[in-house]
Amino acid sequence: MSDAPRIRKFAAYREEVLCEAGREADGAPLVRVAVAAVIANPQPGVWQEDVLVNEPASGIVCRELVLRARRMLDDAEIESYGKGVLIGMDGDQEQGVSFVAGVFGDTLRELTGGSEWVSSVTKRTGPGAPIDIPLAHKNVLKARSHYDSVTIAIPDAPAPGEIVIVIGMATRSRLNERAKGYTVAQGLAER
């Protein structure tokens, strides 16, 4: 496979949360985004023995997704992130996982200043299926304040021979979070 995947289209979702449970934000609004690339499955309908050949393409896709997410966030600081893949019915889950494995995660961390493992979800499905991208703090994975998600669905994707690669990002913790537990400040102080 060449390094550049065939991208059919991009899709995106952005939300700005101003209050939660009837209470105004305890600070700046929470902005969440999900950005997706709909790509051709490199080997639809057949067993792809070496799925790791997909990894170089994943770095290219990740760079474009992060660039688009940053624009949607008006270049605000990204505090949490996550990733996910929808695999069309002519593919299998391992093909999807290969697009968000090593190279993708490394690229996402590099471009966002993150240091932690990136939460992930993959599933095989048909067009229009929603995907909930799990979010966690980019530098303190154990910080409960940033456990969250962002959802996106694309009405015509993934087609049977497609894969949808998604990143999710947020600019802060959940609004008015009070679940206590391990904090970002604790995690950063322990470094």
Image (tube, rainbow, N blue to C red):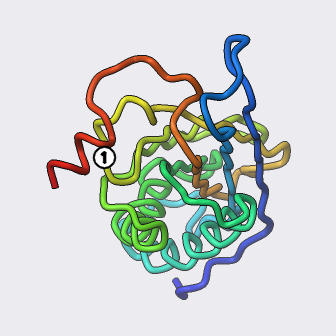
Please state the horizontal and vertical placement of residue 126, each as a whole percent of the image. 71, 40
| Quadrant that contains the C terminus | bottom left
Asked if residue 8 lies left or right of residue 147, the reply is: right
Kind of element beneath mark 1: loop
Task: Determine the image quadrant of residue 101.
Answer: bottom left
Residue drawn at x 47%, y 58% as measured from the top left: 95
Count of numbered tags = 1
Residue found at the far left of this picture:
190
Residue nearest the viewer, comparing 115 with 129: 115
- Disc 1 packing (10 Å; few <14; some 14–19; many ≥20): many
Q: Is 64 drawn above or below residue 17 in the view shown?
A: below
Most extreme residue toward the top, as rendered?
Answer: 22
| Residue located at (31% from left, 52% from top) | 117
User: In the image, is 32 to the left or to the right of 9?
Assistant: left
Q: Where's residue 182, x and y in %? A: 26, 30
Q: Position of residue 71 (x, y in %)?
A: 73, 67
Q: Position of residue 164 (x, y in %)?
A: 65, 55
Residue depicted at 75% across the width and 51% down the height: 159
- Which amino acid type is marked by label 1? Val
Q: Is 45 in front, or is 158?
A: 158
Extreme-right residue of the structure = 155
x 53%, y 48%: residue: 84
Pointer 1: what residue? 140
Q: Which residue in the rendered view is the most extreme toward the front?
A: 27
Is 146 placed left or right of 91 in the picture?
Answer: left
Seen in the image, is 119 located left or right of residue 78? Answer: left
